[in-house]
Amino acid sequence: MPDARGWPCTAGAAEGERVEADELLVLVARGDQKAFEELYGLVSGPVFGLVRRVVRDPAQSEEVAQEVLLELWRSAGRFDPRRGTALAWILTLAHRRAVDRVRSARAATEREQREGMRAHHPAFDQVAEEVEAGLEREWVRHCLERLTNLQRQSVTLAYYDGYTYREVAEQLSLPLGTVKTRMRDGLTRLRECLGGVA
């Protein structure tokens, strides 16, 4: 039964629906359009709901959800049922796309603000600013190299690739508590290094 937006209500999918989604995704990977239609009906509600919580704007949320479902059609072959359920994989795609949209919107707003500020300030020394930015990047890279391999992987996945702690734990095949501890220790060491303490 569709909700007010016309999206099928599939929140709280039962075990049978999860298995069905897994089977449908395998068929979609083979180019089965009918299976895609069924999968679309099964997952479009949860995808929209997740995207809406991240993006907030209803129109942009619908757009992002459609992009995710189109990506699902194109990349269904990348689904590996040994690594989790189809619904979890699809919602991971949705989360990443939603986070990308929020970051992109934030970056656009910041660019507009910088342009507005430049219009009211005298020209700056672009060469000096580029050199300073390059030195800062190099120092961050240096500090990241001082972390343990697990700390560096955890911090990179979470802060550069946008994964949640749970997703980082899945990516590294480690318990969530271990990842949280390594992340905390890694961030502490990074703070000390970047502050010039270490």
Image (cartoon, rainbow, N blue to C red):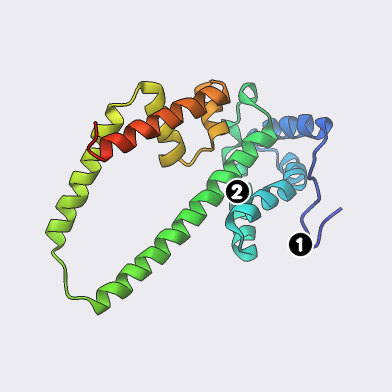
Give the vertical position of 58 relative to 144 (above or below).
below
Q: Position of residue 53 (x, y in %)?
A: 64, 53
How many angstroms separate mark 2 from mark 1 (CA)?
17 Å
- 103 or 69: which is nearer to us? 103
Residue corresponding to mark 2: 68
Element at badge 2?
helix
Name the amino acid type tagged 1.
Answer: Arg
Label 1 Cα neighbours within 10 Å, binned few <14 / some 14-19 / many ≥20: few
* Residue lying furthest right: 1
Single out the mark in the foreground, 2 or 1.
1
Q: Position of residue 67 (x, y in %)?
A: 58, 52
Quarter of the image with the C terminus in it: top left
First in sequence: mark 2 vs mark 1: 1
Q: Nearer the viewer, residue 162 or 97?
A: 162
At 41% from the left and 63% from the top, the residue drawn is 108
For residue 136, side relative to residue 164 (left or right): left
Comparing 118 with 33, the one in front is 118
71 or 116, which is in the foreground? 116
Does 55 sit above or below residue 158?
below
Examine the image and state in which quarter residue 173 appears. top right
Rendered image: mark on residue 136: none
* Contact flag, marks 2 and 1 (Cβ < 8 Å): no
Give the percent coordinates (x, y) of residue 97: 54, 48
Q: Is residue 148 left or right of residue 167?
A: left
- Seen at 69% across and 36% down, the residue is 87
* Residue on which the image places disc 1: 5
Amino acid type, callout 2: Val
Badge 1 marks a residue whose secondary structure is loop
